[in-house]
Image: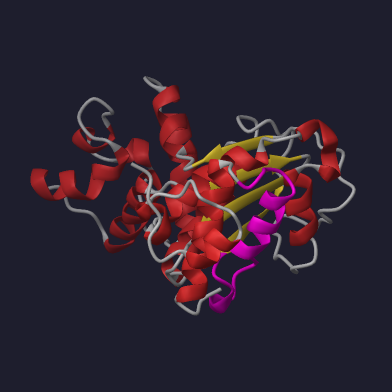
Amino acid sequence: MIVVRNASSLKQQNVFLMNTYDYYNREERSVCAHLFRLLHEKLQDKSASPLGQLLERLSNRKLIFKNGSSSLTNLPFDNIGIYFEAAIIRDAYSNAKPTINLFMDELTKLLVKQEAATDCRLFSQLPKPLNNSKLTHPRQIRQKASEEGVFLKEDESKVYGAMQGMFNAKPDLVITIDNILLVFEAKLTEEFDTKQLARTWNIAEVWSKLLFNDLGFSQPPIFSVVKLGASKFNSDINWKDIFEIVTLTYDENDRTRIAINAAVELLKRKGLE
C-alpha cells in the first residue's frame, strides 16, 4: 500500500506516489542513483541535456581543477562517461591479474608522493605473502603483515594504509567529458568530511595519471572533486539545483522526481537546504 504521512507540501505539488520511507530516507546513495539515471537522459541534446545543465551550473561555482584549467561551457561532449559508486582502482587491479606488479608499483610510487613518504618499498619488493595476489589483497597488506610478523616501516605503514583506503573507497559519482574528469563526493544530510575529501582528491589523481586510457582519455585529464550536498555545508552544487534540473526532465509522477523532491523537502525540514 502506498501512503504519505506528514507530507503536505508534497501533496500541494500533486505528488501522490510517495511511500513513507521516501519522506525520511537520509541515504545519499539513493538520490545519487536517481541522479545517475537523470544524467543519462537526452545526451544527444548536449547543453540542453540534464548533464549539460549540471555542467552549466558548475561552471559558475569556481571549481578547483588540477592538471590544468577548464571551462565547463560549450564543450564538444566527447568521451562521455557517467559512473555510480566507481571502484576503478580495485577493478583495474583485478583486470591486471596475474601480472599485477607493474600496475601496483606505479600505484605505490604515486602514493609515496601523496603521503610525502621517503622510506617505502615498492609493492613488488615486499615479502612474498604481501605481494602475492592469491594470498593478500592490497587492502589487506597491513593486516597480513601483522599476522605474518612482517615488519613495515612507518612510511610503509602510511603508504599501504592509504592504499587500503583507496581500494575500499567508491566515490559516489564520476563524470568524464572531453578532457575533464569530475569526481563527486555526495552527502545528503551530513557534513563533508575533510579526510574523505582529501582521499577522494588522491583517488582522482590516481585515475587521471595511471588509468586515464581506461577512462577514454588520450592523455591525463584535468580533474576536480565536486561537493554535492546541502547548501549549508558549502557544497559546490546542492540538491535544490539538481531538483530544478529534474523538473525540466520528468513529470511530477516520475519516481526520480519524487525521490529527489523528497530529499529537498527533508533538507528543508532540517534547515539544511
User: Residue 72: horizontal and vertical position, in percent?
Assistant: 81, 53
In the displayed structure, does residue 167 sit left or right of residue 55?
left
Residue at position x 44%, y 48% in the image = 30
Q: Nearer the viewer, residue 164 or 268?
A: 268
Pick whichever, 256 or 63, lies toward us.
Answer: 256
Residue 134: x percent and y percent? 23, 25
Extreme-top residue of the structure: 98
Q: Position of residue 130 (x, y in %)?
A: 23, 38
**241 magenta-colored:** yes
Residue 136, by quadrant, is: top left
Q: Residue at x 78, y 47 (%)?
A: 52
Rendered position, 215 above or below 14 = above
Residue 142 lies left or right of residue 259; in this view the side is left
The answer, for residue 155, to whether it is visible in the render is yes
Say whether residue 201 is visible.
no
Q: Quick check: is 247 in the magenta stretch?
A: yes
Q: Position of residue 73 (x, y in %)?
A: 86, 53
54 to the left or right of 128? right
* Residue stretch rendered in magenta on the structure: 229-252
In the image, 209: left or right of 45?
Answer: left
Q: Please state which of residues 35 and 126 is positioned toward the viewer in this rendering.
A: 35
> Please, is residue 31 above or below residue 128 in the view?
below
